[in-house]
Image (cartoon, rainbow, N blue to C red):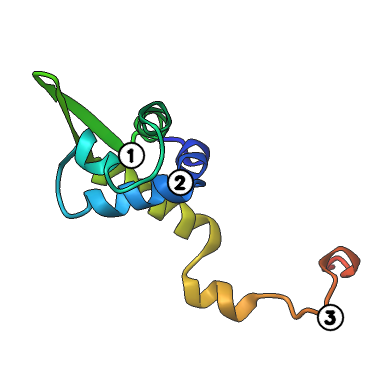
Amino acid sequence: MKIGSVLKALNHPIRRDIVARLRDGPMTAGDLADGYAVSKPTMSTHFAALKEAGLIEGRKNGVVIHYYLNATVAEEAMASLIDLLGSAEAVLTTRSSPTTDPLKLEPKT
């Protein structure tokens, strides 16, 4: 799992919503697509981006594709972000004040 590909895949609101909807269980491509006013090729592009990032898996049953959330990749992505940023509490308490320019801070000696 590469965190960059996961973040890129989750950059679009439809893709984030697809992931959220799949938390409740598998859904067909048609059922997922019915929730959005976009073309089938556009939905295919969204599914492809999520599959490429490893966030979802598709299983074909006849002519119907069932999509599943790959919870392992989602958990790994969350763990990577926590490792990078620390806990939400730590991020909020160490944030620079708006008047502080981090580029003008003196290096620690």
CA gap, disc 2 and disc 1: 9 Å
Q: Secondary structure at mark 1?
A: loop
> How far apart are labels 2 and 3 at the CA level?
31 Å
Q: Quadrant of the C terminus?
A: bottom right
Circle number at residue 55: 1
Label 3 secondary element:
loop
Asked if marks 2 and 1 touch (Cβ < 8 Å), the reply is yes
Whether residue 91 is visible here, answered yes or no, is yes
Horizontal and vertical percent position of residue 35: 30, 48
First-in-chain label (2 vs 3): 2
Residues at marks 1 and 3, CA–CA distance in whole angstroms: 39 Å
Instruction: Please give left or right for residue 61 compared with residue 40 in the image.
Output: left
Circle number at residue 40: none
Amino acid type at circle 3 is: Thr
Towards the viewer: 67 or 93? 67
Q: Quadrant of residue 49?
A: top left
Mark in front: 1 vs 3? 1
Along the line of sight, the residue nearer the viewer: 64 or 2: 64
